[in-house]
Amino acid sequence: MKKLHATITESQRRAHAMRMLILLGALIVIVFVISMNTGVIKLTPMEVLRTLFGGGTSQQSLILFEFRLPRIVISIMVGAGLAVSGCILQGISRNALADPGILGINAGAGLVVVLFVSFYPTSSGTPIFLLPFLALIGAGFTAALIYVLAYKKGEGLLPIRLILVGIAVAAGISAAMIVLMLRLNPQNYQLVAVWLAGSIWGTNWKFVLTLLPWLIVLLPYVFAKAGVLNILNLGDQVATGLGAPVENQRLHLLAAAVGLAGACVAVGGGIGFVGLIGPHLARRLVGPKHQYLLPASALVGGLLLIAADTLARILLQPAEIPTGIVVAVIGAPYFLYLLARSNV
């Protein structure tokens, strides 16, 4: 009877998780449609639909296909990538406050990207495809530094040390970026300032194609490692007892998280808190099992960022608020709430 009860419970959990995933997908579609109809130049739903099927005017086609759609798609992709990256970091560190922005990984990626865009104009064509690779170098170096400093022999990766080291490293990198910005000419300074504020600055299809291969490769790999993340959540000793190569798997997953965060930061700018909020909201919806938590985090992150970007475009029209500021207004209080509830 107990076995039957457990089977029924697991079946019910699976069904509930699938319902939540479908609901999140439907919400993304709804916000997607709303976002296509939102902007300084208004397009009615019928005009959007007609333009999508090739029946709109040249102006409507330009607005929809060259300005709004690339930005909407990038918002969803960046949100999904950052949220999954945060979910991985929270899983491998067993720390509910882990996030690529808070830990300094975003800052490390951003420093290299800022260096690049300061000397090479992104409008020149192919160089933009180098951005994720350059961001990966910066993010990887930062993650390695944080890992070495937070790891304690005999005790493993300590959650409290991970947070404190990450905050310290992020502060140091931010100071380096400020010094760098003081040496820029006005045009590059404005570009860097917009990027640091978290504006979705990659707003054409080239940036979509730049980010897409990273998500196509890394997301399926991470989803396939859901069982490993479940085991790592049990603790290093239990995971080792179950035969899992803890450090090896942790490093592989950390590399995937760094790759996702670096590529998303390179295209989307310095947007924080998505990797923190997304997994937490997803966990409340589908539970702690990573088979459901990882895809739910991707959907919540995409939904959060496309909603924030839509609000950023409509709140102060014709002016525009950087998307990162809208996310921060939501994320900062939520971070303090989580910090107050945690044992850190």
Image: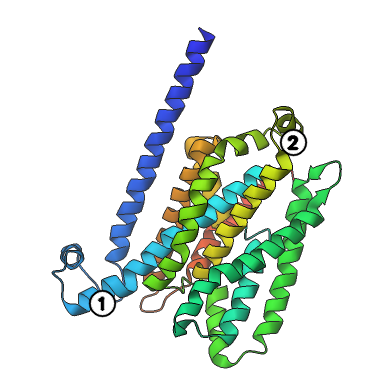
Q: Position of residue 206 (x, y in %)?
A: 40, 72
**Do we see residue 169 in this rendering?**
yes
Spatial CA distance of label 1 from label 2 is 54 Å
Question: Of the residues shown, which amino acid type is indicated by label 1?
Answer: Leu
| Residue in view at x 62 percent, y 89 percent | 184
Q: Residue at x 30, y 53 (%)?
A: 30
Q: Position of residue 194 (x, y in %)?
A: 52, 78
Query: Closer to the camera, 113 or 103?
Result: 113
Q: Secondary structure at mark 1?
A: helix
Q: Mark 1 — residue?
A: 62
- How is the model colour-coded? rainbow
Binning the other alpha carbons within 10 Å of mark 2 as few (below 14), some (14 to 19) or many (20 upward) gives: some
- In the visual, does 203 lie left or right of 236? left
> Could you tell me the amino acid type at mark 2?
Asp
State the residue at coordinates (75%, 52%): 162
Residue 91 spot, x, y in % from top left:
63, 43
